[in-house]
């Protein structure tokens, strides 16, 4: 913390003990019959709902790699869980439980209070119970494992896209990377504030994912850029994709700030945590109804074809995808 002229720096804030860290991160879980034992024993004991199967996801975030150094603690806590909820959304799962492994270089009470507010606030809002974890001293990173439920016998995934299916994306991809690029900027108009919040507080598309699971032939979340993630979906399904960059749902804020780079942000930026999926074209009306119910735009951007090529077009001409804004190592699934 900066010290002004004439001010004498006080003693550094006391560091929390492991017990203090655990206390700050232990949520009140009243009335959760699915949590027989939570934090405080050697393991959590959980009770899945009858007739469900479990979906388990893990995503690690490292300061300096997956989020910039100095990001607000509340945003780090939110993000630690949100990226995992996004993977559950992509599987059409309902989140139930999560564990957290947290590595902290200097655990201070104020920082941890904000981190806990971000993580536990999102957990409470999504019905996710934090039921265990571990804390260690080390560089700042988080690893959350989240567990969700799906009705038995209704698996989702990336492998079912078939030629003729339509390709869709939720929300407005590209906002988050533009928000990340604005973190160090003085620009503070409404567009910049919106874009920064899209990076700092990603919103997993849980309601849309749950509703889409029975209709989608293949689905994943967009964590590493729409082009790269759609390439993964195509490869897993053994199909090609013909995609129209002119149909991309770009937010007015992204268009305002990024100008001619808006399409590139949407295709290569990453950190969107939107859903990309394929579905038979006859489901278009049902998908529009899901979009309305989930208050989440869903836009058709292309068609599944035979083969293995993923091609973007714009105005009838092939659109060469530019190099990404960055590639982070060890990108999550
Ligand atoms: Mg994923």
Image: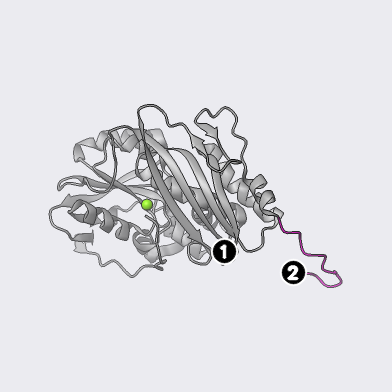
* Disc 1 target residue: 187
Left or right of 304: which side holds 52? right
Distance of label 1 from label 2 (alpha carbons): 23 Å
Q: Is residue 314 visible?
A: no
Residue 192 rendering spot, x and y as whole percentages: 53, 58
Q: Give the camera-side residue of 144 and 270.
A: 144
* Disc 2 target residue: 2
Left or right of 280: which side holds 24? right
Residue 317 rendering spot, x and y as whole percentages: 20, 63
Residue 289 image-quadrant placement: top left
- Residue in view at x 69 percent, y 50 percent: 20
What's drawn in magenta, residue-wise? Answer: 3-16
Relative to 269, residue 202 above or below: above
Kindly report which numbered mark, 1 or 2, lies closer to the viewer in this rendering.
2
Residue 234 image-quadrant placement: bottom left
Q: Quadrant of the N terminus?
A: bottom right
Q: Residue furthest front?
A: 42
Colour approach in the figure: one colour
Residue 311 rendering spot, x and y as whole percentages: 21, 61
Q: Give the camera-side residue of 132 and 116.
A: 132
- Residue in view at x 87 percent, y 72 percent: 6
- Residue in view at x 57 percent, y 63 percent: 187
Residue 188 image-quadrant placement: bottom right
Left or right of 267: which side holds 199? right
Disc 2, SS: loop
Residue 250 is a magenta residue: no
Disc 1, SS: loop
């Amino acid at each position: 913390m900066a010290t002004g002229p004439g001010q004498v720096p006080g003693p550094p804030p006391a560091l929390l003990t492991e017990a203090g860290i655990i206390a700050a991160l232990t949520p009140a879980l009243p009335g959760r019959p699915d949590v027989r034992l939570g934090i405080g024993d050697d393991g959590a004991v959980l009770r899945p709902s009858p007739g469900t199967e479990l979906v388990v996801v893990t995503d690690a975030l490292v300061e300096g790699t997956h989020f910039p150094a100095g990001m607000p603690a509340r945003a780090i806590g939110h993000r630690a869980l949100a990226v995992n909820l996004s993977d559950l959304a992509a599987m059409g799962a309902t989140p139930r439980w999560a564990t957290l492994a947290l590595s902290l270089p200097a655990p201070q009470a104020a920082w941890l209070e904000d981190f806990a507010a971000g993580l536990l606030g999102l957990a409470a809002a999504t019905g996710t119970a934090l039921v265990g974890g571990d804390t260690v001293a080390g560089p700042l990173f988080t690893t959350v494992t989240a567990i969700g439920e799906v009705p038995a016998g209704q698996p989702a995934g990336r492998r079912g896209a078939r030629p003729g299916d339509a390709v869709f994306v939720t929300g407005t991809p590209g906002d988050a990377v533009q928000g990340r690029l604005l973190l160090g900027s003085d620009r503070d108009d409404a567009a910049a504030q919106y874009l920064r919040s899209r990076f700092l507080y990603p919103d997993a598309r849980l309601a849309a994912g749950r509703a889409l699971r029975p209709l989608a032939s293949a689905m994943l979340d967009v964590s590493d850029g729409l082009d790269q993630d759609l390439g993964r979906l195509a490869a897993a399904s053994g199909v090609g994709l013909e995609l129209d960059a002119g149909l991309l749902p770009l937010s007015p804020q992204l268009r305002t700030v990024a100008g001619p780079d808006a399409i590139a942000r949407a295709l290569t930026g990453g950190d969107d945590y939107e859903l990309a999926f394929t579905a038979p074209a006859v489901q278009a009306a049902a998908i529009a109804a899901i979009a309305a119910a989930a208050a989440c735009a869903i836009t058709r951007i292309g068609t599944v074809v035979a083969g293995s090529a993923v091609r973007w077009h714009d105005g009838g001409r092939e659109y060469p995808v530019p190099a990404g804004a960055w590639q982070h190592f060890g990108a999550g699934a």
